[in-house]
Image (spheres, helix red, strand yellow):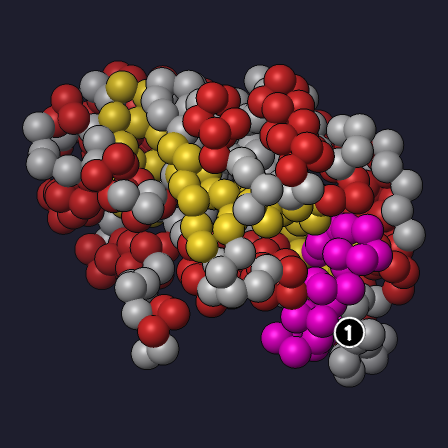
Amino acid sequence: VAKRLEKFKTTIFTQMSILAVKHGAINLGQGFPNFDGPDFVKEAAILAIKDGKNQYARGYGVPELNSAIAARFREDTGLVVDPEKEVTVTSGCTEAIAAAMLGLINPGDEVILFAPFYDSYEATLSMAGAKIKGITLRPPDFSIPLDELKAAVTNKTRAILMNTPHNPTGKMFTREELETIASLCIENDVLVFSDEVYDKLAFEMDHISIASLPGMYERTVTMNSLGKTFSLTGWKIGWAIAPPHLTWGVRQAHSYLTFATSTPAQWAAVAALKAPESYFKELKRDYAAKKEILVKGLKEVGFKVFPSSGTYFVTADHTPFGLENDVAFCEYLIEEVGVVAIPTSVFYLNPEEGKNLVRFAFCKDEETLCGAIERMKQKL
Ligand code: GLN
């Protein structure tokens, strides 16, 4: 394997989902719903296929989808963007992230990353040859240590890569935190790459896109996807929204990574993004109920559960159960209890920092959540 990827193992999500199947364990690990996406979106995909929308799409997106994404972004943030020049459709947000890194970061550029982080960030930054500077978000509230951030951002910083609502902790960046990031970026001429795939799963406060803060749109790449909002994680439809000079970099990388994204799925995404507001309301209401079941259950089992304001994850402290670290705990949980969680140490530059924490996903039907809680109550 190439040096730039030598230190990375098989992603934890693949490892854990394989173990889940092998041990017949209930999978609260990898974040994918165990229920299906809405019929109106699936039907739109079937229609698109039947209608012959099956050859390569335009590289940066089916025009109707670029427009639907721009309209949705305007609805959500108030920002008016040009669908032709500022929106790029990618194969999931993970590709948008990779395209942003590879298209806008030079080898040796310094990029700031908040730990814990979704695992692809470190790997794609490594592929781009970036120099990573980590800032750790600590329990119980995982707020940004603003003084550390201020000390870390200098005129050597090229970009900050951030994620709100935040995977794996469920933390949402507050307006004050976003304003601090914004003023540091403006002062030091720094770009922001913002992964907002859980924006519709914001329970405790309103989601704020950093691009909507004064002076930020011109230096921000906002990335999102269909997967979480429409329970269609396997479709891999994502996008990046950025001013033309940044979109250029994203598109150059995207053109040579995947060139274009699945055509019928893009047509179905147009239908999805036109969903009435009631769809988004119901989604949030359903997830809030699932979250309550999981949080309450985990507390009853004896975990210390940290507050999660958004995403479909909660983070808990497993130390009451006396296992050596998060990996040992998750192995025990799979083999002896029959439940899968994600050890969070894999999301840190220094794994030690995550050794007390595990992540549980609640994007599962009620029966599955209750079944997992029941197993833990009996066997932990
Ligand atoms: N984003 C999902 C999670 O964090 C899974 C992504 C993946 O499997 N690579 O669980």
Indicate the position of residue 199 as horizontal and vertical percent values. 64, 35
Residue in view at x 79 percent, y 33 percent: 215
Q: What x and y, as percent, mark residue 27?
A: 33, 47
Q: Name the residue under label 1.
A: 59
Q: Residues within 10 Å of mark 1 (few under 14, many from 20)?
A: some
Q: Is residue 21 magenta?
A: no
Res 287 seen here? no
In the image, the residue with mark 1 has its CB under 8 Å from the nearest atom of ligand 1: no
Q: In this view, does 375 lie to the left or right of 130?
A: left
Instruction: Tell me which amino acid carries mark 1.
Output: Gly
Residue 179 pos. (x, y %): 66, 23
Q: Which residue of the protein is positioned furthest toward the front in this rendering? A: 155
Image quadrant for the N terminus? Answer: bottom left
In the rendered image, the vertical position of residue 347 relative to residue 59, given as above or below: above
Tell which of 308 and 278 is nearer to you: 308
Please say whether residue 19 is visible from this viewpoint: yes
Image check: 277 left or right of 27? right
Membership of 241 in magenta stretch: yes
Please identify the quarter of the rendering in which residue 71 is found. Answer: top right
For residue 328, above or below residue 180 = below
Q: In which quarter of the image is residue 298?
A: top left
Q: Residue at x 55, y 38 (%)?
A: 154
Location of the C terminus (image quadrant): top left
Quadrant in which residue 195 is drawn: top right
- At a point 43% along the width and 44% down the height, the residue shown is 133
Q: What stretch is highlighted in magenta?
A: 239-266
Nearer to me, 273 or 315: 315
SS label for mark 1:
loop
